[in-house]
């Protein structure tokens, strides 16, 4: 749809051009609302632009890892690699004419509410204005660096999984890898085939599902071109996935948990099997899926070291037992600062209330999408979004559907709205109470799901529950600020 400036009246600023930001753009265009997407990098893609390490792939079936309205009949495998996912997003953004609405190389450093609209300041000091802000800045964006003594002294190469140097050649090298979560497992499987030695420094083993990754049959590719087949298949996968994971949050013996236990038997050597057998309940940490991890760790050139790391030394890694493993390169698969939501952006809402003031420990939130004192400010995949193995694009679609209802309400009534503090606290208390009964707390592990006080910063809701929570705007939960009185004719800087 063409954007009708008379109908639009308002402008929406979307921050971030990953899956979530592109989705917001598509839906804003459909609704005829004027918008601009700000992206700090020179291209779109977020996660799939930044994570280009060997073996990167999605770990939910690719036909489910799409926008529900934009199936992709071309996926080469059940779990597509990262470059295909990036291309899918690029193609979809082109199809829906989103590229022309993205301002690249533009990081939003601050957002300040001006009484009737938001003033956005880029890190280069440029100003922009919008009545509504939608943040789509990602939950897994800022890499987490391990706090290891001597890291700067290492003489070889150091690669973080989320900032991979694509010129790095692992062939013939002795490589150490720290981290055995989703990215670590994918890197281990890939590098084990080409590195001369791969030493895995494992602090905690993960539950790994050994999932086959067959090529997509030709007939499936053909059938998926038919919209009704694609729609049916997406829904079927969603149902199957929900069945597989049902109960895992409450620590029940869910199908997925049973499968993970069974798959461990693929490790033939009992000593090695004991090393990779977690001592916590499946589901406590995000479960990992891999077609070839169990084979990779049984290769001759692969060793798992479970002794803690004492320090990094110029020639390699020294463990607490005094052993030094000589290495040419160290791979850090140490994940992300998952609690750094929206940061380092400075956000100042109504009456000068800052994000830092209301978020000492992410402890205020309204239904994952809005914040008190922040009028016309919305988040996609915000804090307390569902965790576990739920495909994130489906969560983003539910968030955006709700946000679009709010955008329409704001546009039609010329208002600014933010949830009240009481409604936010009530909602969050409910989620935190429920979250503290989950396997994330009771399962006997530490994970990035847990906030500083040990209560998860993720929501135990499944997709249906989230959908129900975000079905309609509950106006009683909102504070309505003064009418938007900006001069519609003024130029946006
Ligand atoms: C290796 C890896 C594999 C994954 N696999 C799966 C999977 O199989 N299934 C699944 O559901 N999820 C998976 N995820 C989670 C994944 O992050 C989400 O599925 C999804 O890609 C998130 O999209 P997003 O748009 O919300 O965030 P992101 O992809 O992180 O995009 C955020 C964008 O915002 C930009 N940005 C941030 N701050 C600013 C700012 N201040 N100004 C301007 N721009 C800004 C960033 O540059 C980035 O482009 C995976 C994550 C990783 C790291």
Image (cartoon, rainbow, N blue to C red):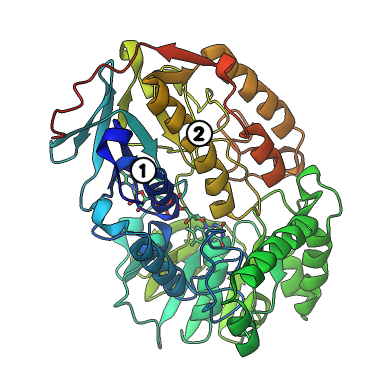
In the image: residue 297, left or right of residue 418: right
Please say whether residue 205 is visible from this viewpoint.
Answer: yes
Q: Which mark is residue 53?
A: none
Camera-near label (2 vs 1) is 1
Q: Which residue is mark 1?
A: 32
Q: Nearer the viewer, residue 215 or 275?
A: 215
Indicate the secondary structure of the residue bearing disc 1. Answer: loop
Pointer 2 and pointer 1: residues touching (CB < 8 Å)?
no
The residue drawn where x is 50% and y is 42% is 400
- Which quadrant of the rendered structure holds the C terminus? top left
Residue 204: x %, y % from top left: 64, 56
Image coordinates for residue 297, horizontal then vertical, percent: 63, 78
Q: Give the Cα separation between the discs numbered 2 and 1.
A: 13 Å
- Residue placed at 84% from the left, 62% from the top? 258
Res 405 label: 2
Q: Identify the residue shown where x is 32% and y is 59%.
A: 97
Q: How far from the left and from the top, in percent, is residue 12?
A: 32, 36
Residue 219 relative to residue 371: left or right: right
Question: Under tag 2, what secondary structure?
Answer: helix
């Amino acid at each position: 749809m063409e954007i009708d400036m008379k109908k639009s009246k308002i402008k929406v600023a979307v921050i971030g051009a990953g899956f979530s930001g592109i989705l917001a753009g598509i839906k804003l265009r459909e609704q005829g609302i004027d918008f601009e997407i700000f992206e700090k990098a020179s291209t779109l893609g977020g996660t799939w632009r930044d994570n280009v390490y060997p073996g990167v792939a999605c770990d939910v079936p690719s036909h489910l890892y799409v926008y529900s309205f934009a199936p992709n009949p071309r996926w080469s495998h059940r779990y597509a690699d990262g470059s295909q996912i990036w291309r899918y997003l690029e193609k979809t953004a082109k199809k829906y004419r989103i590229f022309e609405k993205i301002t690249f190389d533009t990081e939003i450093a601050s957002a300040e509410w001006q009484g009737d609209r938001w003033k956005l300041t880029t890190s280069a000091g440029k100003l922009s204005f919008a009545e509504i802000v939608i943040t789509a800045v990602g939950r897994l964006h800022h890499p987490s660096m391990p706090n290891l003594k001597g890291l700067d002294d290492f003489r070889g190469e150091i690669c973080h999984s989320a900032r991979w140097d694509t010129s790095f050649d692992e062939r013939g090298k002795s490589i150490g890898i720290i981290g055995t979560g989703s990215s670590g497992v994918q890197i281990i499987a890939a590098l084990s085939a080409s590195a001369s030695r791969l030493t895995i420094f494992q602090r905690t083993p993960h539950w790994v599902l050994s999932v086959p990754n067959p090529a997509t049959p030709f007939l499936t590719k053909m059938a998926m071109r038919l919209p009704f087949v694609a729609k049916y298949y997406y829904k079927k996968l969603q149902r199957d996935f929900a069945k597989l994971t049902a109960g895992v949050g409450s620590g029940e013996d869910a199908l997925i948990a049973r499968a993970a236990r069974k798959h461990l038997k693929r490790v033939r050597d009992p000593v090695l099997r004991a090393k990779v057998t977690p001592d916590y309940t499946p589901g406590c940490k995000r479960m990992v899926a891999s077609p070839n991890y169990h084979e990779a760790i049984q290769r001759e050139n692969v060793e798992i070291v479970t002794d803690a790391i004492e320090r990094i030394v110029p020639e390699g890694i020294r463990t607490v037992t005094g052993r030094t493993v000589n290495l040419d390169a160290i791979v850090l698969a140490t994940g992300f600062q998952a609690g750094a939501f929206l940061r380092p952006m400075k956000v100042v809402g109504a009456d000068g209330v800052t994000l830092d003031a209301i978020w000492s420990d992410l402890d205020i939130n309204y239904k994952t999408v809005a914040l008190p004192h922040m009028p016309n400010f919305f988040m996609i995949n915000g804090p307390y979004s569902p965790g576990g193995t739920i495909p994130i694009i489906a969560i983003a679609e539910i968030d955006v559907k709700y946000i679009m209802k709010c955008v329409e309400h704001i546009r039609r009534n010329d208002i600014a709205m933010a949830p009240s503090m009481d409604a936010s606290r009530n909602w969050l208390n409910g989620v935190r109470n429920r979250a503290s009964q989950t396997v994330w707390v009771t399962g006997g592990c530490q994970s990035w799901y847990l906030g500083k006080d040990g209560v998860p910063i993720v929501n135990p809701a499944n997709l249906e529950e989230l959908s129900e929570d975000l079905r309609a705007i509950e106006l009683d939960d909102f504070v309505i600020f003064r009418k938007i009185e900006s001069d519609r004719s003024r130029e946006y800087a």
